[in-house]
Amino acid sequence: MKKSLSLLLIFILLGGLSIGIYHYKKPTQRANPLETYSRLHCTGRTLNLSVFLGNEWMNYTAKRLNLSKCPDGGFTEIVDTITPDVHSTYYFVAALRTINETPSNRIQTIAWLHTQEDGMFRNSSKVRYSFKNVYHGIMTLVMLNSTPRDPDKIIDFVMNVTRENGAFVYDGLDVTEQAIEILHVLGYNVSNLNDTVRYELAKFKNLTPPREGDRLEALKFVSEFNRYTRAMDLLGVNYTATREYKEDISFIENISRNVSSILMTHPPLFLVTELAQALRKNGFMKSSSSEAIYVYVKSHELPNGGFNLFGQDYGEFQGTYYAVKALALAGKKPDNKTIRFIHSWESPLGGFAFTFQKFGGPILTHMGVYVAKKIGTSINRTQIKNYLEKALHDRWPYSQDDPEPLYSIYLTYKELNMSMNQDDEEYLKNETVRLMELYSRSRVNSILSDTGWISLIKLGNALGVTFSSRTKENLINVILSKRNPNGTFGAYTNSTPLTLFQTVNAVILLHELGYDYRDDKTIQYLNSLMHDGGWGGPDIYNTYRVVQALAYMNCCPEKVDDIVTFVGSLKYRYGGFRFYRGDTSHGGLQETYFALRILELLDAI
């Protein structure tokens, strides 16, 4: 490897030397290093993005793009952060309520929860809905100072899962404490549930403090103690005079004397919250305990202000709720970053979207950076560069033999006007040479169907690492041999999608290989397939690629205004673009990238 790196530097210093299938030369400085083709001056006017797309759309897209930023510094797809989720909504509303705040979309959230009643509350069946869905939906309404529209049907549903011993069992799970809470908030007199009173009291009396020294079991005991006493408080049970209660309280008072040592076992946040709850409720919360809990919880805060219950590197609703509640019980407040994190997941439809784990990808990162720059969203250059340095060597989730992520990494550096360090630049050039050898040796037959060829040749041109003249000539001849009399390329003349795909690839490849291809029949063919303002379905991807191919031939497409109108029609109200008209998805990063690229190619933005 060291020898090949040395040879590479020698060839570059010599200014270029043809060997075998590739050629090294100093890359030329281009006016636009990101594209090898010029904009088409087709519209005669330049659109103002804020006016064309609308400020509301710009704000939603910026919000969703920010949510697609990953902890590793890259970007992921701007997935569905629009559809509300009942579990996420419950925990985030509960977190805000803990600090006396409410969601910004409170009215929409109540309205959305009411729309869920027909399916979730009124007709809850074991097949489709869990008891937890019902519990979270009802308790969220209550926290927002609202009530279900038909509480009697919910009460009937809950009472239908009671057992002879007083327990409430749903689908094999004991949900007694949740059932008691639901019935209580809906106005049912739970003190009349005599069997349930005896059942809960028996469970409480069977609760035994663990042996001394087992700190994790001590926290689990505290959690169970809280659960049973909370239920008995609602049931109106006088349990404080029992011997078991006095023993339990004595145990809790004892562990309150050294909270720091208990936290040294690194317990999960929900058990820390239970400890804080027991200390606060029973008068054992000392300043030293409060500080110890605060320091422990804050040590779990992630860069975006969220918390994760399972120790992962992304904020989610359960971990954030338990962290906020533990801090509040300790007499502390979460920082503004945590509060902003919670609000960032609010859905414009009401409620909160489901949080998800995010992993950056090289191609999506390039698209994310491009879109962020176009709509004026701030990006963390340092985090992105750290991601790019790692992604260069590990292009997950792509194969090491795929040139597209490599080219995307290069483009992202250029988009941000950042330089690679010398070792990484040499690695990138060596990888380009390796892939050139691989592709020219075993993938020539798929040159029109494998888009990796386009990325590879573009990357080589940008780096000054190109195929030799003889290899270029051979590749050009292979492509031209696949040209059909009607100006199309490829063997699938009776299959429009494949023929269109391969024809576009051929035009781009010929240009990148230095062949000045401009054929009236090819242009006529491409224009003939335009319908309803685009190509393909029509869809945003095929439209982008055809406009790109026409740009390589320096030809404006017909009916440019129809294309601009088509692109505008794919705008999703809550940010991003859809793939085609009637698409039920919620607007994606890739579609947004293609849409803005089309407008840019047409010189519309």
Image (cartoon, rainbow, N blue to C red):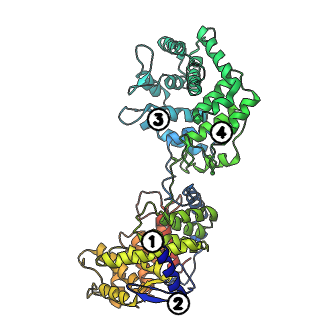
What residue would you read off at disc 4? Answer: 297
Q: From the viewer's perspective, is the residue at label 4 or at label 3 nearer?
A: 4
Disc sitting over residue 133 in the figure = 3
Residue at (50%, 44%) from the top-left corner? 85
- Which amino acid lies under the numbered mark 2 shown in the image of this protein? Gly
The disc, 2 or 3, on the residue closer to the chain's N-terminal end is 2
**Residue 305 appears left or right of 331:** left
Mark 1 touches mark 2? (CB < 8 Å): no
- Which amino acid lies under the numbered mark 3 shown in the image of this protein? Asn
For the residue labelled by badge 1, is the local secondary structure a helix, a strand or a loop? helix
The disc, 1 or 3, on the residue closer to the chain's N-terminal end is 3
The disc, 4 or 3, on the residue closer to the chain's N-terminal end is 3
Q: From the viewer's perspective, is the residue at label 1 or at label 2 nearer?
A: 2
CA gap, disc 4 and disc 1: 50 Å
Q: From the viewer's perspective, is the residue at label 2 or at label 3 nearer?
A: 2
Label 1 packing within 10 angstroms: few (<14), some (14-19), many (20+): many
What x and y, as percent, mark residue 529?
34, 78
Q: Where, by quadrant of the figure, is residue 563 drawn?
A: bottom left
Q: Where, by quadrant of the figure, is residue 321 drawn?
A: top right
In the image, residue 222 sits, relative to residue 501, either above or below, namely above
What residue would you read off at disc 1? Answer: 566
The disc, 1 or 2, on the residue closer to the chain's N-terminal end is 2
Label 4 packing within 10 angstroms: few (<14), some (14-19), many (20+): many
What residue would you read off at disc 2? Answer: 15
The disc, 2 or 4, on the residue closer to the chain's N-terminal end is 2
What x and y, as percent, mark residue 49?
58, 71
